[in-house]
Image (cartoon, grey):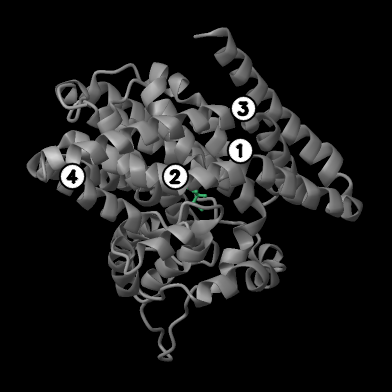
Amino acid sequence: MGKKEIVLTVLILLALLAGVLVGQFVLHAGGEAAAGSIEVFTKLGDLLFIRPLRMLVVPIVFIGVTVGVAGIGRADKLGLLGGTTIAYYLLTMAASITVGLALVGVFKPGAGADLASLEENAKSAFENSVESRIEDRPETFTDVVFQLGESLVSDNPIRSAAEGDTLPLVTLAILLGLALVLIREKGEAAIAFFQSLFEALIRLVLWIIWLAIPGIFFIVAARVGQVGFEGFAGPLAKFSMVVVVGLLIHSVITLPTVLAVFGRINPFVFMWQMRKPLLTAFGTSSSAATLPITIEEAVQSGGCSRRAANFVLPVGATINMDGTALYIAVVVSFLFELYGFELTLIQYAIILFTATLTAVGAAAVPSASLVLMAIVIGAVNNTLPALEDGETQLLPLHAIGIILGVDRLLDMCRTAVNVWGDSVGAKLLTRLAPDEDAASRS
Ligand code: ASP
């Protein structure tokens, strides 16, 4: 590791630590008086780091996927890679949910908690920050599936790009990459053009990484300043612990085992190599904004093939969310428990299934899962039996408000796990799509 690398890593870690300390002891302790400073910090973090990263997301996804697919070069190989990638996404998300549900079963974070005190502010918190966002969201599970299908194919790729919607751009890029290979010599000039453009974009990412130092400081300080750590000490402590322990088990046991067994790779060396995207995800709570750094580091430091990284990471950033899937499942089962419902095995299976699909549908931006949680709650509510008087007692949606206080900080943790899951996928699939046999063409 070069000297520059060490300096950058140490500075990012220091920025993170300073952000937490300033957030808790200056901004949060400042109460109302610090509200203005929190706003300025949020804006500075956005301007210095999130915006420059977001600026690169659309070009890097479109050009990267085109280059990656053109490198793979054959539809059957691409089909195999695509199929294996999707299977990896779904299986690891199901594994992380299972860990989360098992932990809820063991620790029972909702049992015995004082519902009345927790519910006190939940309703207004829910109405203020989640309800309006739920309105234009899909309501039923069928809606989610349709919306997912529609989000794969855009009727206007320029509009999708303008809205930062990357999934339809991935579809277009896959098709374009394949077509470029199929037209043989005529496609070579365009492939070479995209390849050199991609190299330049990677260089831009290398510059922007340095902005992580001030960026992460401001974003983390503002976030911690807004909510503080009190939430973790109160009645939600046990719930937060279950989420964090679940995320830890998934990231230091489950995924590393998969990587060691199927990839024959030392997972912790790879985790260290991917530290910059992981810290960035933690700092920004957005896998989409982190994506340029994930792609660059996976190839430059992590030893992933360009073909695998360029394909698996952009698709994974929107689809593969292990941390989010676990989080949604834990929140929903915690809330049902808190309200005194005893769920059956079938209902847990429904949570497993719907939480996987809602995590797939969640946008890779801060607090995306909050909005989609309502769908999983709705799916379980639908299975609740009617009482003797014919009425069915349901879990009210405003229950989501209960976890709002700790959501922002847990978002940081689950986003890092989301990015870690994508990175492990890219490393594993490098075995299926190595770069070497493309050397003749590129
Ligand atoms: N913030 C998460 C991400 O960007 C999504 C979520 O769970 O809210 O990956």
Residue at position x 63%, y 69% in the image:
126
Residue 322 visible in the shown view: no
Give the residue type at disc 1.
Gly
Give the residue type at disc 4.
Leu
In the image, farthest residue toward the left:
76
Q: In whole angstroms, how far apart are the C-alphas of marks 3 and 2? A: 26 Å
Residue under label 2, please give it.
323
Q: Residues within 10 Å of mark 4 (few under 14, many from 20)?
A: many
Examine the image and state in which quarter residue 385 appears: bottom left
Residue at position x 45%, y 40% in the image:
291
Q: Position of residue 3 (x, y in %)?
A: 58, 8
The mark found on residue 437 in the picture is: none
Q: Nearer the viewer, residue 119 or 147?
A: 147
Residue under label 1, please give it.
283
Of marks 3 and 2, the one in the foreground = 3
Residue under label 4, please give it.
180
Of marks 4 and 2, the one in the foreground = 4
Please report whichever mark, 1 or 4, sits nearer to the chain's N-terminal start. Answer: 4
Q: Nearer the viewer, residue 271 or 115?
A: 271
Please report whichever mark, 4 or 2, sits nearer to the chain's N-terminal start. Answer: 4
Q: Quadrant of the C terminus?
A: top left
Q: Position of residue 120 (x, y in %)?
A: 71, 68
Q: In whole angstroms, how far apart are the C-alphas of marks 4 and 3? A: 35 Å
Give the residue type at disc 3.
Trp
Give the residue type at disc 2.
Gly
Residue under label 3, please give it.
210
Of marks 4 and 3, the one in the foreground = 4
Q: In whole angstroms, how far apart are the C-alphas of marks 1 and 4? A: 38 Å
